Amino acid sequence: MMTSGMRRWWAVGAMVLAVLAVGFDVTILSLALPALATGLDASTSQLQWFVAAYTLVFAAAMIPGGMLGDRFGRKKMLVTALIVFGVSSLAAAYAPSAGAFIAARAVLGLGGAVILPMVLGVVPTLFDARERRRAIAMVMAAAMVGYPIGPILGGWLLGHFWWGSVFLINVPVVVLAVAAVLAWLPESRAARTRRLDLPGIATSSAALAALTFGVIQAGQYGWGDATSVVPLAGGAVLVAAFVLCERRTGEPLVDLRLFRETGFTVGTLLSTAVNFVMFGVLFAVPQYFQAVLGTDAMGGGIRLLPLIGGMLASAVVADRFAARAGARGSVCLGFVLLAGAMFGGATAAAVGGHGLAAAWTTVAGLGLGLVMPVAMDAAIGTLDEERSGVGSAVIQAVRMVGGSFGAAILGSVLNAGYRGRLDLTGLAPAAARAVREGVYGGLEVAHRTGRDALAVQVRGAYTHGMDLVLVVSAVLGLLCALGALLLPSRRAGRVGPTGAERPQSDHEAAV
């Protein structure tokens, strides 16, 4: 006979499978782009939309997806989203054209946008404060595991099968996740049905889509280009309109009183800062492994495993450590470790070698494992069961936008540092342009022209750019360590649908 406690942890296992399905897809697409360009005869613009279609729909649908779970049942919506994700993965794998693939990616984004808020929205309904951090640690670890496992599996599949195979691996994971959710996850929903806040849904979706599109454009064309400035400005205006709408409606989509809770606001911002740092690092470091240290994409994924190992090791003890040192102590120490790892990485990159890279990425993982579950718990622990789906979607939306800004801003830092170290005297204009575009173009030119000195210069320039990214990340980590002191040492209660706080029991409030 399975006890209720065992059933809850089996339910966490089901949610881990759901998150893994999304995590695999994030990294595999970038690995498959060259094969997709050939297999689907895709233009550069279409390749950009292979990525953007998923990201934009994901951003726009996240908060409405959380609302649907609160309204119709989180288990029901999670199963539906998983099925959508699996079917659209099949459609992407067998897409006959670039247009069909873009459509499949858009539907994939819709499924992913519902999966993540539902998973985290269920956690507050299943666990008290003592166990919640452990459950969150397992879910966040699953999300991170997808980053290195995706390139490892994807690299092997691309080496043995056609490009569509990298999307088919989502299908068995989705099937297992659906079976596990149906078997072990209890249904939960808001106690009463509320009026749909259509203005809130429209403005929140449009704002997130505009901001995300602006960041994508900024990464491609620069922050001063009109194609990035206009959507970013429009997104900011839409955020203001959303806040105004939510203040004036009697039953808002998002209860803005959540942001008066120190735990929710600070926990969300700190977990977003981690996304900011990690998205930049996960963009820069794999290229370092491949272009500078000479690994392939699969080898780059393998060399990220120390990061995951460190994270899993610290996540195991994060719950007990936070119970003794408090949320402030745990998050502060985690950010100090992250900052130290980033500074160490900036020093070690110039020396080179896989051993040093494994050492500092392991320390970064240790810091990440301490920060993420505790910071997320500070935010999620304030959510009332009535609106845990929408509340979790807000947290995820802020984290996603922060991660997108991190990738774009740190990518700009990387490019500036890289280009600032190049001396392209004597190169033809077309070759010089290719070198400035990025490290892979630079190495291709060096190989084609037989200039070994240029290859050395390109690798050194990229290493310098990555050093700058790591230093900026380290400084942000130290600032966040100070920000962790703002975390409440004790939560007063959870915010309910009317804005009143529900007092927590002594057991729930203990940290």
Image (cartoon, rainbow, N blue to C red):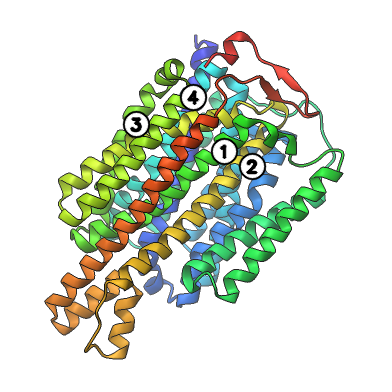
Q: Residue at x 69, y 64 (%)?
A: 234
Look at the numbered discs 1 and 2 and tell me whether their residues touch, using CB distance below 8 Å. Answer: yes
Depth order, front residue of 143/228? 228
Q: How far is mark 1 from mark 2, CA to CA? A: 9 Å
Depth order, front residue of 435/135? 435
Left/right placement of residue 43 relative to residue 231 reads left
Numbered disc 4: secondary structure: helix
**Mark 2 vs mark 4: in front:** 4
Where is residue 240 shown, x and y percent of the image?
A: 74, 54
Specify the amino acid type for callout 3. Leu
The residue that disc 3 covers is 312
Q: How far is mark 1 from mark 4, CA to CA? A: 14 Å
Specify the amino acid type for callout 4. Ala
Where is residue 204 shown, x and y percent of the image?
A: 71, 52
The residue that disc 1 covers is 268
Specify the amino acid type for callout 1. Thr
The residue that disc 4 covers is 327
Numbered disc 3: secondary structure: helix
Q: Residue at x 80, y 41 (%)?
A: 252
The residue that disc 2 covers is 394
